[in-house]
Amino acid sequence: MQKAEVIAKVEKFKTKREVPIKMSSKKTEKELKIEDLPGIGAASAEKLREGGFDTLMSIAVATLGEIVNSAGVTETTARKAIKAARDGMDMGFQSGLELMKKRESIQKIPTGCKNFDTLLAGGVETGAITECFGQYGSGKTQIGQILAVQTILADPEAVAVYIDTENTFRPGRVIQFCQAVGLNSEDVLKNIKVARAFNSDHQMLLAEKVEDLIKEGLKVKLVVVDSLTAHFRAEFVGRGTLAERQQKLNKHMHVLARLAVIHNLAVYVTNQVMSKPDQFFGDPTEAIGGHIVAHNSTYRIYLRRGKKGTRVGKLVDAPDLADDECIFQITENGIEDA
Ligand code: GTP
Ligand code: MG
């Protein structure tokens, strides 16, 4: 895509951003209720709802084990229920045109920094996971907090969920970002729900709990997990534990991806890097989490320190954007063009 086109897209998006977010219509889901699924009576349906499986879509994409545990039914019943939910959901092929229409409901949350937003053709996308990885101080946490403020700037009713694993969420910093865009910081802080995750299991549970907030009626449009990998990295040490770690990370990211798609919200995760001592040429660092994190993230941005205190953001993986770089700086107001 040409730079001019990207800029035009950003400008177009800015005006579009005022429009409230519309989920793609789920008519079929309304027509068929959970109770209508074979073998699922009122009691099992209630248990499923309590377990977070409150839509046909959530059942259609669930694993057998999840339905067995949640509803307390046999595997055979769970298999039939999932199949019926899938049939009812019309999960087959769609035409490109239908997909294009669906993508109209996708929103972008900007960072407020022109260079960075241009790199992402508008900002961080709903319905997807965006990952920023890089060394300490590269700006990962700052961007997470800026996105929380920008989410509420775009829609005062929107809620941002911040899963903080490193105790680096700073309300004082959020107040600065609010002042920079003329928002009442108290209103914004009310709409940012922060939870400190003490270990990887806690972190996974918190991600699952986001569904509860949505059920309570909160309009969650952004989920930040900062950092996605730090607990996993600290808890699973040594080669023997690698498989288990990756399995858990995979499950965690699936929960996040499902939240993003089902509720048309943006997921932003941060990730550290490790050094590759055997790398003689190019950048001697590599993101944590290997293929699991790489494959589950829709957009990946590598952040590093540039010249004279600047930061460089490099888009390294995106389904619809060209690999590109941008330069920005972290200031009192947020991130700005350098
Ligand atoms: P780790 O979590 O340690 O891996 O790093 P990170 O990538 O999350 O770093 P973070 O986003 O917290 O960025 C920290 C950097 O932001 C600091 O080193 C400062 O350079 C910059 N920074 C933080 N607060 C301010 C501020 O109020 N003003 C300015 N100008 N810069 C700030
Ligand atoms: Mg950080």
Image: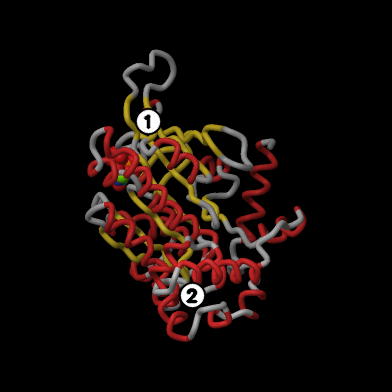
> What element does badge 1 sit on?
strand
- The answer to whether residue 203 of the structure is visible from this angle is yes
Look at 38% across and 39% down and name the residue there: 289
Q: Residues within 10 Å of mark 2 (few under 14, many from 20)?
A: some
Q: Residue furthest top?
A: 280
Which residue is label 1 attached to?
305
- The answer to whether residue 58 of the structure is visible from this angle is no
Q: Position of residue 250 (x, y in %)?
A: 41, 48
Amino acid at the residue labelled 2:
Asp
Q: How many marks?
A: 2
Cβ–Cβ below 8 Å for labels 1 and 2? Answer: no
Look at 38% across and 55% down and name the residue there: 177
Amino acid at the residue labelled 1:
Arg
Which residue is label 2 attached to?
54
Residue 121 vertical placement versus 22 (above, below) = above
Instruction: Depth check: give the residue in front, 16 or 135.
Output: 135
Q: Position of residue 66 (x, y in %)?
A: 42, 64
Instruction: Depth check: give the residue in front, 101 or 93.
Output: 93
Instruction: Judge left or right: residue 173 versus residue 107.
Output: left
Instruction: Judge left or right: residue 160 versus residue 107.
Output: left
> What element does badge 2 sit on?
loop
Ligand 1: image quarter: top left
Pick whichever of labels 1 and 2 is earlier in the sequence. Answer: 2
Residue 48 vertical placement versus 326 (above, below) = below
Residue 296 vertical placement versus 218 (above, below) = above
Q: Position of residue 110 (x, y in %)?
A: 52, 52
Q: Say which quarter of the image contains residue 284.
A: top left
Q: Position of residue 224 (x, y in %)?
A: 39, 55
Q: Residues within 10 Å of mark 1 (few under 14, many from 20)?
A: some
How far is the residue under mark 1 from the one under mark 2?
45 Å
Look at 66% across and 74% down and name the residue there: 28
